[in-house]
Amino acid sequence: MKKSYRIVTYGCAMNRSDSERMAATLESLGFQPARENRAPDLLIFNACSVRQSAIDRIYGQAGNIRELKTRNPKLKTIVTGCVLPQDRGSFKQRFDLVFNIKDLARLRSDLGDFKKPSQQDIDYFKIEPRSQSKFSALVPVSFGCNRFCTYCAVPYTRGLEIDRPAAEIVAEVAEFISRGFREITLLGQTVSSWRDPEKPKYEFVDLLAEIEKMPGKFWLRFTSPYVLDFDEKLIRFLAQAQKANNYLNLPLQSGDDTILKRMNRRYSVSEYLRVLNWAKKQIPDFNFSTDIIVGFCGETGKQFQNTYQVFARIKPAMAYIARYSPRPGTVSQKLMKDDVSAKTKKARLEKLTRLLRKTAKENLEKEIGKTLEVLVDTWRPRKKESLGKTRNFKTVRFPSPKNLTGQFANVKILKAREFELEGKLI
Ligand code: SF4
């Protein structure tokens, strides 16, 4: 009987994409996904170090692992993904194996297959993923990050940015499209800083243009871009594109220049606003979200108020708002004081969230009465309703007796809630 595996994934789309590559590697070694009620032979935690809570949840698995081991004494446990050096040591004491996601080849030898690994095993990017979805593909274009924001663990857990050659990315995307995939999402920690390592003049915008030209009906998304990588050329391309994003997640992090400097974000508020205003003016039906950290080291009431005012001015459709929490080994943890109280952080988060509810709803209300094209991603048979996303990433819910998952549908918008639209299929 084949051995079985289960992967528990924490964190972002990048980690979900890594899990797909891991699943493909395990299946090439003869493993199969474990059935839900069975204790697997291999339990893998794909960790995220952006917040302590995700790491604590892995430590908190001890009881569950004990219970699984009583049902399957051969169970092996593995931790990979974004793991800080400080956590690596203590995970090693608790789990059977801790490995760097880039070293998937090691997994092969660590699991007892001591054949000399092929070049394909060695190159993380060359592993064909086992996509979780039948219509939406995650395609990594780079690994790691060179930006070193002072609060962020990524450059330490994933290392410096390694870009994948354009030819490989294009071939992988073409393969997904030939299999009928409707949505391609290019992934990178700062996806827009990607350049072809084999042809350095070939930039991210050239990659988008090459994929945009591919025949077939699909939408091309990318996340997360970095504001300093945006130039007129990229915005002009997005303005005329038919398949590529007219939605951007453009992290601001703070609306105060002193805090941005302390975060080592390398742009000022006015530089951010310049890029955002270009995009708003030039890209038809443009929609955007942002990321904000409240209560960063030394953030005064006035500095938070600056963030609040910028937020009120830019009116994002969505924002991922986090309370600052120091990650071990980062510059802010080592050299700065986490001196904003938990109570103040909470109050700032709530204040910004209240504003977000307003800006999000205003943004969606503009769509009432329009007919929008939606890529359906969920069907709820009990409620007989579907959910999906527009090309500019607005969530739409509508009644549908049939499962339309993976299909495009035209929906007339009747109502706007805070974070989603409601309509009827036409
Ligand atoms: S850009 Fe900054 S926040 Fe984003 S992954 Fe890189 S270091 Fe982290």
Image (cartoon, helix red, strand yellow):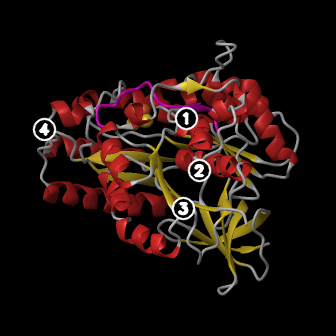
Mark 1 touching mark 4, by CB under 8 A? no
Residue mark closest to the camera, 4 vs 2: 2
Distance between mark 2 and mark 1 Cα atoms: 12 Å
Q: Earlier in the sequence, mark 3 or mark 4?
A: 4
Which numbered marker is on residue 364? 3
Magenta-colored span: 140-151
The question of residue 144 being in magenta is answered with yes
Percent x, y of residue 151: 29, 37
Distance between mark 3 and mark 1 Cα atoms: 40 Å
Q: Earlier in the sequence, mark 1 or mark 4?
A: 1
Mark 3 touching mark 4, by CB under 8 A? no
| Residue on which the image places disc 1 | 102
Which numbered marker is on residue 19? 2
**Element assignment for label 3:** helix
Which numbered marker is on residue 337? 4
Toward which corner of the image does residue 94 lie, by quadrant?
A: bottom left
Number of residues whose C-alpha sits closer than 10 Å to that of mark 1, classed few (under 14), some (14–19) or many (20 or more): some
Badge 3 amino acid: Leu
Distance between mark 4 and mark 2 Cα atoms: 35 Å
Badge 4 amino acid: Lys
Toward which corner of the image does residue 5 lie, by quadrant?
A: bottom right
The question of residue 385 being in magenta is answered with no
Q: Earlier in the sequence, mark 2 or mark 3?
A: 2
Question: Is 367 left or right of 175, judged from the image as shown?
Answer: left
Q: Earlier in the sequence, mark 2 or mark 1?
A: 2
Number of residues whose C-alpha sits closer than 10 Å to that of mark 4, classed few (under 14), some (14–19) or many (20 or more): few
- Any part of residue 309 in sight: no
